[in-house]
Amino acid sequence: MKNTFGNSISVTLFGESHSSETGAVLDGLAPGIKVSEELIAEKLSLRRPWGIISTGRVEADHFRIVSGVFNGYTTGTPVCILIPNENVQSRDYTQTRQLARPGHADYTAYCKYHGFEDYRGGGHFSGRLTAPLVAAGAIALSALSGRGILVGTHMARCAGIPDRSFADSEKDLEKDLKKLSGSRFAVLDEEAAVQMRAAIEQAAGEGDSVGGILETAVTGLPAGVGEPWFDSIESLLAHALFSIPAIKGVEFGDGFAMSDFRGSQANDSFALQGGEVITKTNHNGGINGGISNGMPVLFRCAVKPTPSIYKEQDTIDFIDHTEKKILIRGRHDPSIVHRVRVVVDCVTALVLCDLLAQRFGTDYLGEKQEQRISER
Amino acid sequence: MKNTFGNSISVTLFGESHSSETGAVLDGLAPGIKVSEELIAEKLSLRRPWGIISTGRVEADHFRIVSGVFNGYTTGTPVCILIPNENVQSRDYTQTRQLARPGHADYTAYCKYHGFEDYRGGGHFSGRLTAPLVAAGAIALSALSGRGILVGTHMARCAGIPDRSFADSEKDLEKDLKKLSGSRFAVLDEEAAVQMRAAIEQAAGEGDSVGGILETAVTGLPAGVGEPWFDSIESLLAHALFSIPAIKGVEFGDGFAMSDFRGSQANDSFALQGGEVITKTNHNGGINGGISNGMPVLFRCAVKPTPSIYKEQDTIDFIDHTEKKILIRGRHDPSIVHRVRVVVDCVTALVLCDLLAQRFGTDYLGEKQEQRISER
Amino acid sequence: MKNTFGNSISVTLFGESHSSETGAVLDGLAPGIKVSEELIAEKLSLRRPWGIISTGRVEADHFRIVSGVFNGYTTGTPVCILIPNENVQSRDYTQTRQLARPGHADYTAYCKYHGFEDYRGGGHFSGRLTAPLVAAGAIALSALSGRGILVGTHMARCAGIPDRSFADSEKDLEKDLKKLSGSRFAVLDEEAAVQMRAAIEQAAGEGDSVGGILETAVTGLPAGVGEPWFDSIESLLAHALFSIPAIKGVEFGDGFAMSDFRGSQANDSFALQGGEVITKTNHNGGINGGISNGMPVLFRCAVKPTPSIYKEQDTIDFIDHTEKKILIRGRHDPSIVHRVRVVVDCVTALVLCDLLAQRFGTDYLGEKQEQRISER
Amino acid sequence: MKNTFGNSISVTLFGESHSSETGAVLDGLAPGIKVSEELIAEKLSLRRPWGIISTGRVEADHFRIVSGVFNGYTTGTPVCILIPNENVQSRDYTQTRQLARPGHADYTAYCKYHGFEDYRGGGHFSGRLTAPLVAAGAIALSALSGRGILVGTHMARCAGIPDRSFADSEKDLEKDLKKLSGSRFAVLDEEAAVQMRAAIEQAAGEGDSVGGILETAVTGLPAGVGEPWFDSIESLLAHALFSIPAIKGVEFGDGFAMSDFRGSQANDSFALQGGEVITKTNHNGGINGGISNGMPVLFRCAVKPTPSIYKEQDTIDFIDHTEKKILIRGRHDPSIVHRVRVVVDCVTALVLCDLLAQRFGTDYLGEKQEQRISER
């Protein structure tokens, strides 16, 4: 199963940078999930490049739901969403197609596909494929919020500049998540946001790019979701998150910092609060033994700097087997951290929907039949 | 697929801390992989507790291969390995069974299994289940080495003390891997090892525990292995690694550190060396676009400190729904970082064997038929 | 995995009778399989209704390959094929949407999807979805023929009239398969074909429908393909074949007839023929213990008569919960046996490609790199 | 996934005819399913050979539940069951190991495993592996009956002698199923049973073997279970049923007979009976569009005659590549139809549990928590 992921709910991804469309098939969704085209459009807009800090290739993302949605609700059968590639610049790739762009998949694709790969614009490896992933994830996000589960991500760090952490949100975490939801440059601390933009612009001016760290929180997930070994929440989320291009690290709770803790620091004591089981701290990110404990699920993803830069680099011609210099032209992003943000939200939502459907059955995320009938 | 992982080659895990045995079924292996019981025993011994820095529960790990091996070679049909739980202390759990040990899965297991779970010694969540995982992985490691692929891990950090990195191994990486292979306390720098042990002993003396970071290298993996999206090498390895209890973070190449890099630093330039394609640096850990590029695969795992400590902790009685104090008795490890090391090697080997079998077919990892016939 | 099938090579199906398109995503194909749009069009034409013996809804099947094919060859990444639903008659379904058509899925869909299902024209259950399955299968058929593996099916029985069996083809089986390949009414015995058509027309005249039996042969499949238990060739083929609407029985070799045999009749003796291992008879349909033995794979599928008929039938209104009469209007087929034929070929090809890719690796079905380079 | 089958609930099978044990791992079961060792023993006894009509190799089937059951209930974690091979006759296989027994998997195993296979007693292909499948299935049967779902199978035909059909059971189907449940020679019509035994004995006397047809009924399955395309009930059941050695055909409802029906005969009209939706006939075997309609699920399996017979047969030596004669010695069954019966029940139960868990969540088949707590 290469381009399909998930058990009870699965997503299948297809397309290339220059194919007529990219798309996703989302299967296993409950019948009766309200599908808002506005919400999908909004999530796609968060992923879309804008301003000086992004590539000049701006796609309108005129997505189209081909199947699986009827009268505004999921039917329970596969939802296929297509997004056209409209702003494709047909240019001559013959000069560069056999030069491996450093940090890109040109060379590894050649090793795997023997030259049959579509090399135009990164082909199947292009970040363009995160657009249908976001469209599919928007439906998953909406299904979760129908169950009171919120997912949100901010730039905890960009170009070396830190934002404040969700750990400092305390009781206002849900408020933070709602605030972030529609933001195109999702940072909790306004001042940090200003500095990050400046740093991105500076890197752009130097023909270079920057990376960052995304921090995600999930609230409202019931305790008891996830599996002990191979299908731990961490395993499934990490599997999906590392599918996103440029993600090179994933940590849950205090993650790598915990490696320097003592056990007495790292353990989260249990307590009761208003009759509910809570933990007093949340170093473990809401997960014990691979299973949710009812606290917010917290994790962070490392995003490497965009590999496309405007500087000359050393490389090889992998067909002629010679060393060469490469100067990448075209349009690219000095930073994708703010754009990857919504992709992280979306794959997180897809994984959680899958786990919930597995746990509580295929109808769990849909609207109740009684509600529906009264609406007719 | 909860306790089964893998596509072409899969492993299924079963057992509890106090069940008669724990075990694993390894399916999809090529016929004709030489199975050395000595190697399995050696790998199990690296996982086994020893000395003052480990739990007093020492198991002999008298593993038994039930099926799938005939005349010293894999048959190609499922290999089941059983490991008895011999050193089980039958004691009274009635007092503590409903108290959630902080950092453990007692509470989440209760939420998921409603009290039907086997709570003795952590039940199915016990680290004991890594024993059959290691036994299965030992066969995978041996199959890989038959193809010239080496996997090795060391403690890059323990109790806050750093070891030198594989990145400093330069051309001697394979030598380092071979040296580490049989070590019970796998550290590259002898001096660091001494300090780590002292720090573990000190924490033990204080009834506390420590964590650390494991760094893994894979050499000899051919370029072109892995898939672009959901089955990227990073995705599959992270999926498996996060299945290991206590792992809270995984990063590839320079991982989280890359988030502060500029693109010009993070990109690995390609070059030719003796006719072979290499990258001059290896910040991306041997993986571009989810696919191996022929350089060593490098990643690091954060291991949280053992949650079992000898200090009183706040908790709840999750059945009576009251707040309580808990003082854990019994035998436990002040550090498991050195023991988790071989588990990381083993799940890594299982994932790579799966990817190679998928790529090159089910016979790839077995001995050639011609060889076999000449041996008869 | 509801609408996705396969391991190394998988197909994902989506769409409804009245959605803008139906489609399939074919993933895991080798890079370098030549894709002939003519062949796909030809296979689709075999599935398309024609003449008096079919429904009046004739679709042009203007398929479109969205992704995964570049310069006429598969790239190795997912192939998405879309087929528009062009000849959709928008009519008023409000009168009949809550009446369960006997033999159809209206009632069971309602039980499963609680009324959210797209009920127009059978929705997701429509035979229209076999069109993208055929388009995907056409590529699989072509990949197999590149390896010398032929798949072909004829109507062994229709409306009670028998054709001669492949068992009588003897040495000319491949010739028969080639002859059948382009036939729109695939019958070996011309005389039987004439009688079948007459019988279908007679049933049509009476507002009724007929069924039949399809017999399939696969030649050229190497020995040693398939798995002993759950992934036996029989298991995987039957899984796929029973996905086709109207298939109610599958038997391999002499199938149900073998239940009356003695062991001495049923066993196929081995022999050597021109240095090759053969069996003297082929009662077991080329499969022993779930694995191919090198002889032709033979199986038969029972196709029930089309449930849409022009006679009044008893039924229920499943929303108002009352008994009703139903008289189905619209366009339908008095027989689909001849149209299902190519669907059987196609799912067979998909399963065999999957098994071969699993066995021999992902490159097996593609053209050799050397060939490709010389073509540039 | 070769030896693992299932989505939400999966079974993994391992072992060989002469391995120390055969076994199965059953994963994904709800916590709180009562596990009766007596029931498992009873089901195993139905599979065990007895009397003159079976092989002389009689195994006591001293099964052992290794994991996943605690205090008499499933825990929700994997259940591993082991069954020792006790009555293994160590004899010299060197003379016959390279002779392909007709109708057996010796030759195909050699083609697949290149001689590394365990050839003793049929190795991994031995019917012995159905013992752990039955043990696992016994738990599934018991979980289903806790939900009011009954599964039962009888010999609809053996050695050419027909039993009466479930179709004639009318309202007494459940009574028939209960009666069959403990029968070692499951036939509805006593007179037919006597004739079948006589026919088996006669074939045995002639050194030959016979086959038959098994008919299965499932009652109490709610409407709305199953999936439209690849995971139709027919697809999943057929996948599992064709895994059973000797099954060469599977048909649902009237199956192959429907191919001669008119649509007006084949369609099952809907009606209301005591407020419940029923169909007046059940030609479609309780399944429309791959999904249960609430009527009994009915299907039939063709069992070929046992390939082991006491007659000289033509064959080849597949290593020396010469034609040979073979006279099989050892112990074997003149008929396995009556023994396969319980295997069919068991794999049916496993598939249905999987579909129900997928549909209604992982807790569905377990006992209610409230019940459990009152029992403590």
Image (cartoon, coloured by chain):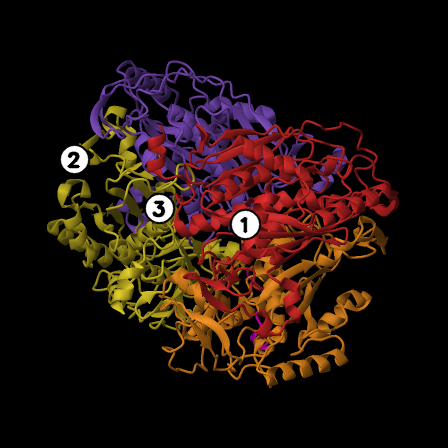
Chain colours: A red, B orange, C purple, D yellow
Labels 2, 1: one chain: no
Labels 3, 2: one chain: yes
Q: Amino acid at mark 2?
A: Gln
Q: Which residue is drawn at the image coordinates 71% and 41% (left, top)? A: C369
Q: Amino acid at mark 1?
A: Glu
* Disc nearer the start of the sequence (3/2): 3
The magenta stretch is B31-42
Q: Is residue C6 left or right of residue C323?
A: right
Q: In the figure, residue D328 lies in which quadrant? A: bottom left
Q: Is residue A243 visible?
A: yes
Q: In the figure, residue B113 lies in which quadrant? A: bottom left
Q: Nearer the viewer, residue A138 or C358?
A: A138
- Callout 3: chain: D
Vertically, is C372 above or below D153?
Answer: above
Q: Amino acid at mark 3?
A: Leu
Q: Nearer the viewer, residue C265 or C370?
A: C370
Q: Which residue is drawn at the image coordinates 48% and 82% (left, top)? A: B330
Give the labeled residue for mark 1. A174
Q: Is residue A252 left or right of residue B280?
A: left
Give the labeled residue for mark 3. D237
Give the labeled residue for mark 2. D273
Badge 2 local density, few (<14 within 10 Å), some, or many (20+)?
few
Quadrant holding the C terminus of chain C: top right
Residue A154: give x, y in percent of width and height.
64, 49
